Image (cartoon, grey):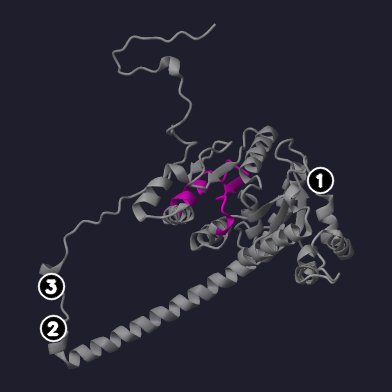
Amino acid sequence: MASTDGEPSTSQTLEKKPVAVIVIGMAGAGKSTFVQRINSYLNSRDELRPPYILNLDPAVTHVPYEANIDIRDTINYQEVMKQYNLGPNGGILTALNLFTTKFDQVLDLVEKRSDEVDHVILDTPGQIEIFTWSASGSIITDAIASSMPAVVAYVIDTPRTTAPATFMSNMLYACSILYKTKLPFILVFNKIDVQPHDFALEWMTDFEAFQEALATHGGTRDAEGEPTYMNSLMNSMSLVLDEFYKNLKAVGVSSVTGQGLKEFFDAVEDSRGEYEKDYLPELEKARKAKEASLKAAKEDSMNRMLKDLAIDRQNPEFAARDRWDPEEENDDDDDDTDINIIDRSSEPWPGQYVDITKVKRHEDEQMNWPRPG
């Protein structure tokens, strides 16, 4: 519905924007393979509107898809570890922090493509805590969610969650991420070609079924036949998470066969409405509160400055001591070099396909490599 002043309404504006899917999951859950599969699925559905993909893992050696923006083109992960004397996780975190300082360029590139794509896919680092609990991860998530409809896809390794304790650990982590990001959330049970996810859906909807599975699982009772502490804790946590399960979307997919991808994107489209209904009002409220806070801070700063000027007029000798001396200015140049984000889909990039039969070491070389056969 159009607004009264003739401008498009908020919902109409959002409909023209792509949906950002932030793919998160434990190491080994199959995030990159899942991104590759949804990339193939979206290309096959409409090859004229392929997804726009961002790889945010600086330590990965190979990704099974071609990213439009790759953090590895901007940040050298190994050099970061050497320069700052860091371990693997510290190197990934620092690389992500450095990349975040230029994320405004990423948003500009995504905005330029907003009329050409329907989905923006973010593949996050394998170490889930580095993205979900770091300042840079929060900045990236908030920046994306402020620019377009966004949804978090939490990928779960289904074969490894058949044990009740592992399942409960995954659900607790998913719950914490949901309440931290406050974005529409989809549980993606991956690898259902190996292990169907029916048991997980049953445990989420039937408390007694989870209790029964917990009671029959080994190690739930001590030597005297009494339930162990962990058994009692998981029973209690399953009751606590009952409300969490009610408002949660869960789908099963296979990154190998492509099973369940239609249901996943149906859930993504449903999440767009959830974003408009729940997230946008909170975003506007937070924005107004921030503007009011900044206005109050500016007024306070101005009042302090006027007070200081009044004191300086009363004590001119003290004001003279505080004057800036240009001879004491440090002329050292700023060593920080400008880093530009690369959009691989707009121009050639290192590693792009090259026909080696036409490669020449210099312009004057007259050599043609015959093709085999």
Residue to which mark 3 is pinned: 325
Measured as percent of width and height from the top left, residue 324 is found at 16, 74
Tags 2 and 3 touching, CB below 8 Å: no
Who comes first in sequence, dot 2 or dot 3? Answer: 2
In the picture, the quarter occupied by the N terminus is bottom right
Can you say whether 38 is above or below 187 in the image?
above
The crowding category of the residue bearing disc 2, from other C-alpha atoms within 10 Å (few below 14, some 14 to 19, many at least 20), is: few
Q: Quadrant of residue 258?
A: top right
In the picture, the quarter occupied by the C terminus is top right
Q: Separation of disc 2 and disc 3 at Cα?
A: 11 Å
Residue to which mark 2 is pinned: 320
Who comes first in sequence, dot 2 or dot 1? Answer: 1
Is residue 116 on the magenta stretch?
A: yes
Tags 1 and 3 touching, CB below 8 Å: no
Question: Along the horizontal axis of the image, is 60 left or right of 364?
Answer: right
Residue to which mark 1 is pinned: 196
* Badge 2 amino acid: Ala
- Residue at image position (86%, 63%) is 215
Tags 2 and 1 touching, CB below 8 Å: no
* Badge 3 amino acid: Asp
The residue furthest front is 223
Confirm whether residue 269 shows in the render. Answer: no
Along the line of sight, the residue nearer the viewer: 48 or 28: 28
Residue range (magenta): 102-129
What number of labels is visible? 3
Can you say whether 309 is above or below 122 in the image?
below
The crowding category of the residue bearing disc 3, from other C-alpha atoms within 10 Å (few below 14, some 14 to 19, many at least 20), is: few
Measured as percent of width and height from the top left, residue 362 is found at 30, 18
Along the line of sight, the residue nearer the viewer: 188 or 290: 188
Question: Along the horizontal axis of the image, is 213 left or right of 273?
Answer: right
